[in-house]
């Protein structure tokens, strides 16, 4: 206690050694003990004493409390010696601390005296508690800055001004300084003799000189201190204090760079000014300024109730009273769908009715949505007369009328709307000649007329679509051809020749066929080049064999578990040749019998094969068809041999057709020989080639 | 079995209890500690986020993403580098390459000869943007688009790069951009999925796209992208089975819904609720989808505009037209992929074909949206997953060369949706290798897209496995310079 008093008296004369400073720095830790212990001691002294034993503990409590108060105060004095400046708050805190320690000591040492005078005791404890509170508050102000406790409340209550109204210093710079610097550089603390709580102080600078040179952030002390390494003693704010955010630091930099103006309106700076851009963003952290509406939000329940699968009502953004409404479903829409929205007529600012059968009589409902800013009526069934009635929508900014029957005369009537900025009239009867005077008269409105085919560029049509799956059919079938483009003429041939806009038959209805054909069809339309031909092959199967018997087996790599694969009426696909739709032979010929329960007289045998020379799949070298009433009595009915391809050929599937000499048969034996030695140009020359077959058709 | 059920029940109850608690009054104070700003209406967290309501009034309501899969060369499209033509054949200086890693495809290469564009460039529009001759239609809309020449990414191979672009992470387990948008904005038309995917394939060297790219990740499965195919049934399993009419279908769905409701009550699993919604939506889609797919009612001008390929299902042009129709009908996110842009070799030949596939239809989409007044509210994005090297991969001649993968700089363009039209943003060095001005990272790109849709990318979050996830993870800055 005496040491403490000594410190108080001779404060200015004491220079402390470094090891003592450590003790001083424990002050922020120690201070919690006296606060709690003293308050408990004060509090307990108010309670009626119950028995003697607890009195001893209480005496001990008072002793410890007093001791801790004194130690804390001493540590505080030592700490304060480190700080070379003195603010009012520090002085108050010091006095408070010493008084607290003194009161604590008195409370312990002279408790006996107090005990006999309850009124004095109560007064003493109340005063003590008040001194502790005040001292604690001053201490907290020193470390955390003023208004630390209530700051969150202030912060959220205080709205940032809109950028267009912001004053540079008071609305942007000062708040940053207040939040990050003013804890130390305020009138009560004044560290480094620098005051950052008002414009004068900022301009004046502190002990180390002026804070900044306008236009030269690199030469400015303020910027230098902010960007020193964090562990540097001169870095500001001190490492233990909240640091400036990147955005704040960038703002200060840009502010000095652009001249460190003070009482100027932010928006009086040039639009390209970096500070102006940064500050605008800083003041609007939530993106672009939302439009402000003066109407109230609609009843949430009502909005929810009116929302359904074909009518979607959503607020423009969070907290916005304005609503955007989209309607969908041509078949669901009725005038009622719109009328039901009338309870929200104030709030609806965007309405999308595109592609719905909206008629003129619905306009009377639409007209009531007085706050409409954007109205999409693309491809609705409005007439010109209907459009004219939109003149009462005084807030309308954008009007979409593409694909409607609006005429120039009716359009002109709506264009008078003050706020109207954009009008969309693509695919309407309004032509460029009629539009010209309107554009001149309403120069503030943007007219979007879109793309109109002026015939300057002629391009090719896409081919038609042949709807039937190509391949094998029995007896007869009809083939449908379509084209998704209306007004297209489809021409076709069945003999494999190329159809064009004059040759070939015009397609009017599905084509009946009862023989094998190669269908080619092309699309034609004026203003377009005719399309490439779509092509499909249809193979008629006359005699379906009743069974098949293999003489040689396909290679295990390309075989099928289904013996009828060659007579199942389906052509093999290309996606994966090992999918069981193709039979492959390499080291020996393919040979099999086809049996018919009834006698037949076929004209030809057709074999669906594959060619892919890169994969060593070659056309067969030789094909033979033998026929007779049973396998014991066969004669050669037809044969064919193929030259070996002279160069690599791309992958295709094709049909080998073998004409037969006339005979009544119940059994056919077919033998197909692969090329036995690959030609010299092939990588595996000399090896046998593959043959692949997927179907055999007898006609 | 009984024990397992009991365990499951207990588990569910605990989960229920915890989730109830988090909204209960008693935990509100605790909640406000964990989630700063719960009470002060600044919307600092997902608690203040209402699915379907953006943080602020959005510029764009919908996105159409024309993904050029395989990575088209920026040097033959939008980043004009005449220096490369002058230095043709010279080795790329190490001072420029700066140790940039190589792919396995060129790491064995002894030299890195610079190669200039085979195609000519010209300036177009008010902005004077340099665009290559193989994109004549896009050149015509130069004043409607914003070309970003300073994109950069972290991945150097297709799959991670593509996954990064689509989900914000290189590993494929996160929700796709479209799923995030669906989660954030909700559906605009309840008769169609909020997120649709359309695929097409060019003739050039292609790279795969996988369904993980349109995954909902940890988000609710209703946000998953729905793939449309080009066949007779654009959406598989949507049509009624043979012999079932609409009434029977309705009855069946009602009964199934009843059963599902019972399950939902008992177990409270949100996936059951999602299932019920999906059945219902599929039912409504049965009418909505055929209407959308029908292109026969499109006026002649539209077919001329997109090119008649737009009538052939499965082509890029058809997908662009379909994208416009879906978008016009309130689909939040239409994701296209056009494959075939991976020109490691034979670039001059292949790239012309690829460009022909997409040029007219891409430009047509912009024009078409514009003439309907929809471009302002639809954000269209065109670009690949990374760029291509300024040096040649493989054998090089004037007429034939290839380019390897290059993550350090590439070009994309955006249009509509509140992006500044007629702008060229960012710059690469004269070698077209490093960015020298205004780099835009994938995270920045995502942040910007979300911003246009009305979201603060830092606040559009979803809590999963103990932490909040964002599309931009822990990075990303909105590129404010390109905002209109």
Image (cartoon, coloured by chain):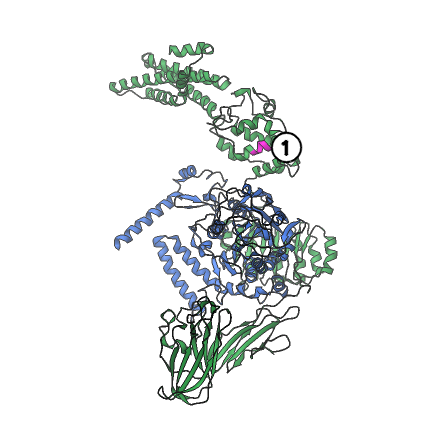
Chain colours: A green, B blue
Residue A252 painted magenta: yes
Magenta-tinted stretch: A250-254
Name the residue tied to disc 1: A258
Helix, strand or loop for disc 1: loop
The image quarter containing residue A265 is top right
Q: Quadrant of the N terminus of chain A?
A: top left
Q: Measured along the vertical axis of the image, is residue B408 above or below residue A453?
A: above
Front residue (pair B300, A581): A581
Left/right placement of residue A265 relative to residue A545 reads right
The image quarter containing residue B29 is top left
The crowd level at tag 1 (other Cα within 10 Å; few <14, some 14-19, many 20+) is: some
Q: Chain of mark 1?
A: A
Position of residue A556 measured from the top left corner of the image (x, y, whole percent):
36, 70
Left/right placement of residue A527 relative to residue B92 reads right
Q: Measured along the vertical axis of the image, is residue A426 above or below residue A418?
A: below
Residue A297 seen in the current view: no
């Amino acid at each position: 206690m005496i040491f403490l008093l000594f410190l108080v008296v001779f404060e200015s004369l004491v220079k402390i050694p470094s090891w003592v400073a450590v003790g001083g720095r424990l002050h922020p830790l120690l201070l919690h003990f006296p606060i709690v212990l003293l308050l408990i001691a004060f509090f307990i002294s108010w309670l009626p004493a119950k028995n003697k034993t607890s009195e001893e503990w209480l005496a001990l409590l008072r002793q410890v409390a007093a001791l801790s108060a004194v130690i804390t105060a001493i540590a505080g004095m030592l700490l304060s010696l480190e700080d070379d400046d003195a603010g009012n708050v520090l002085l108050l805190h010091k006095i408070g601390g010493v008084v607290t320690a003194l009161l604590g000591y008195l409370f312990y040492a002279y408790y006996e005296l107090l005990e006999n005078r309850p009124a004095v005791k109560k007064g003493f404890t109340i005063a003590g508690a008040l001194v502790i509170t005040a001292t604690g508050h001053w201490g907290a102000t020193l470390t955390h800055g003023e208004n630390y406790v209530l700051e969150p409340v202030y912060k959220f209550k205080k709205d940032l001004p809109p950028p267009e109204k912001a004053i540079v210093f008071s609305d942007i710079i000062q708040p940053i300084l207040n939040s990050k610097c003013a804890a130390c550089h305020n009138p009560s603390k004044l560290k480094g003799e620098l005051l950052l709580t008002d414009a004068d102080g900022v301009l004046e600078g502190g002990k180390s000189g002026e804070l900044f040179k306008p236009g030269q952030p690199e030469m400015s002390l303020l910027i230098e201190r902010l960007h020193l390494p964090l562990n540097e003693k001169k870095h500001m704010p001190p490492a233990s204090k909240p640091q400036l955010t990147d955005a704040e630091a960038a703002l200060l930099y840009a502010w000095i760079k652009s001249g460190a103006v003070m009482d100027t309106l932010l928006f009086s700076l040039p639009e390209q000014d970096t500070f102006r851009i940064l500050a605008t963003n800083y003041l609007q952290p939530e993106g672009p300024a939302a439009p402000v509406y003066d109407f109230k939000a609609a009843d949430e329940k009502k909005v929810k109730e009116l929302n359904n699968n074909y009518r979607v009502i959503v607020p423009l953004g969070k907290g916005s009273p304005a609503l955007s409404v989209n309607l969908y479903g041509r078949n669901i829409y009725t005038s009622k769908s719109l009328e039901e929205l009338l309870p929200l007529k104030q709030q609806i600012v965007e309405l999308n009715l595109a592609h719905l059968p909206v008629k003129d009589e619905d306009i009377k409902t639409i007209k009531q949505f007085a706050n409409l800013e954007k109205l999409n009526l693309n491809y609705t069934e409005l007439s010109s007369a209907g459009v004219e009635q939109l003149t009462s929508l005084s807030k309308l900014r954008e009007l979409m009328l593409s694909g409607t029957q609006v005429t120039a005369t009716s359009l002109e009537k709506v264009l008078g709307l003050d706020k109207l900025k954009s009008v969309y009239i693509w695919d309407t009867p309004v032509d460029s000649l009629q539009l010209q005077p309107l554009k001149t008269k309403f120069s503030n409105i943007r007219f979007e007329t879109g793309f109109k085919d002026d015939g300057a560029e002629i391009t090719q049509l896409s081919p038609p679509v042949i709807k039937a799956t190509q391949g094998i059919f029995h007896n007869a079938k009809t083939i449908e051809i379509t084209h998704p483009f209306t007004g297209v003429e489809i021409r076709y041939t069945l003999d494999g020749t190329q159809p064009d806009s004059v040759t070939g038959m015009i397609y009017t209805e599905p084509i009946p066929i009862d023989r094998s054909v190669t269908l080619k069809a092309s699309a034609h339309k004026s203003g377009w080049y005719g399309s490439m031909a779509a092509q499909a092959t249809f193979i008629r199967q006359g005699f379906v064999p009743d069974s098949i018997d293999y003489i040689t087996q396909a290679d295990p790599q390309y075989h099928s578990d289904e013996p009828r694969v060659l007579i199942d009426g389906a052509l093999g696909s290309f996606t994966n040749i090992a999918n069981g739709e193709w039979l492959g032979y390499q080291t020996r010929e393919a040979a099999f019998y086809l049996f018919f329960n009834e006698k037949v007289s076929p004209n030809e045998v057709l074999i669906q094969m594959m060619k892919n020379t890169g994969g060593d799949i070659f056309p067969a070298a030789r094909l033979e068809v033998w026929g007779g009433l049973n396998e014991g009595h066969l004669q050669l009915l037809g044969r064919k041999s193929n030259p070996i391809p002279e160069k690599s050929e791309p992958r295709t599937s094709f049909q080998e057709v073998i004409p037969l000499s006339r005979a009544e048969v119940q059994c056919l034996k077919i033998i197909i020989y692969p090329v036995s030695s690959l030609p010299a140009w092939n990588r595996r020359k000399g090896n046998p080639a593959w043959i692949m077959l997927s179907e055999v058709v007898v006609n | 079995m009984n024990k397992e059920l009991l365990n499951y029940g207990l588990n569910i109850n605990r989960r229920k209890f915890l989730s109830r608690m988090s909204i209960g009054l008693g935990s509100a104070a605790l909640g406000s500690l964990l989630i700063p700003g719960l009470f002060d209406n600044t919307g600092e967290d997902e608690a203040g986020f209402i699915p379907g309501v953006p943080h602020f009034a959005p510029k764009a309501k919908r996105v159409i993403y024309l993904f050029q899969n395989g990575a088209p060369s920026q040097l033959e499209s939008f980043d004009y580098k005449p220096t490369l033509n002058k230095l043709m054949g010279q080795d790329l200086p190490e001072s420029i390459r700066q140790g940039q890693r190589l792919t396995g495809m060129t790491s064995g290469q002894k030299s890195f000869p610079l190669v200039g564009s085979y195609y000519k460039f010209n300036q177009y529009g008010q902005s004077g943007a340099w665009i290559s001759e193989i994109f004549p239609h896009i050149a015509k809309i130069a004043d409607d688009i914003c070309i970003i020449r300073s994109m950069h990414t972290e991945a150097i191979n297709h799959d991670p790069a593509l996954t990064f672009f689509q989900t914000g992470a290189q590993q494929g387990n996160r929700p796709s951009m479209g799923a995030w948008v669906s989660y954030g904005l909700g559906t605009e038309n309840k008769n169609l999925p909020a997120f649709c995917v359309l695929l097409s394939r060019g003739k050039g060297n292609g790279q795969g796209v996988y369904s993980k790219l349109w995954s909902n990740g940890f988000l609710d499965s209703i946000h998953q992208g729905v793939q449309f195919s080009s066949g007779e049934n654009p959406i598989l399993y949507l049509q009624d089975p043979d012999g079932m009419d609409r009434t029977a279908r309705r009855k069946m769905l009602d009964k199934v819904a009843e059963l599902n409701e019972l399950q939902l009550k008992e177990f409270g699993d949100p996936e059951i609720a999602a299932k019920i919604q999906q059945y219902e939506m599929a039912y409504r889609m049965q009418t909505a989808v055929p209407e959308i797919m029908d292109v026969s009612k499109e006026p002649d001008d539209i077919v001329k505009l997109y090119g008649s390929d737009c009538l052939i299902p499965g082509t890029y042009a058809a997908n662009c037209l379909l994208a416009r129709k879906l978008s016009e009908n309130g689909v939040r996110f239409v994701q296209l992929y056009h494959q075939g842009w991976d020109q490691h070799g034979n670039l001059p030949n292949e790239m012309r074909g690829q460009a022909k596939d997409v040029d007219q239809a891409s430009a047509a989409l912009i024009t078409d949206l514009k003439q309907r007044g929809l471009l302002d509210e639809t954000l269209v994005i065109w670009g690949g997953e990374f760029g291509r090297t300024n040096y040649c991969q493989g054998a090089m001649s004037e007429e034939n060369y290839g380019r390897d993968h290059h993550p350090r700089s590439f070009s994309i363009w955006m249009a509509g949706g509140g992006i500044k039209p007629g702008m060229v943003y960012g710059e690469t060095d004269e070698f077209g290798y490093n960015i020298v001005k205004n780099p835009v990272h994938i995270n920045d790109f995502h942040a910007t897209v979300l911003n246009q849709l009305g979201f603060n990318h830092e606040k559009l979050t979803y809590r999963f496995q103990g932490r909040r996830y964002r599309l931009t993870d822990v990075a990303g800055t909105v590129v404010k310079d390109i905002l209109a």
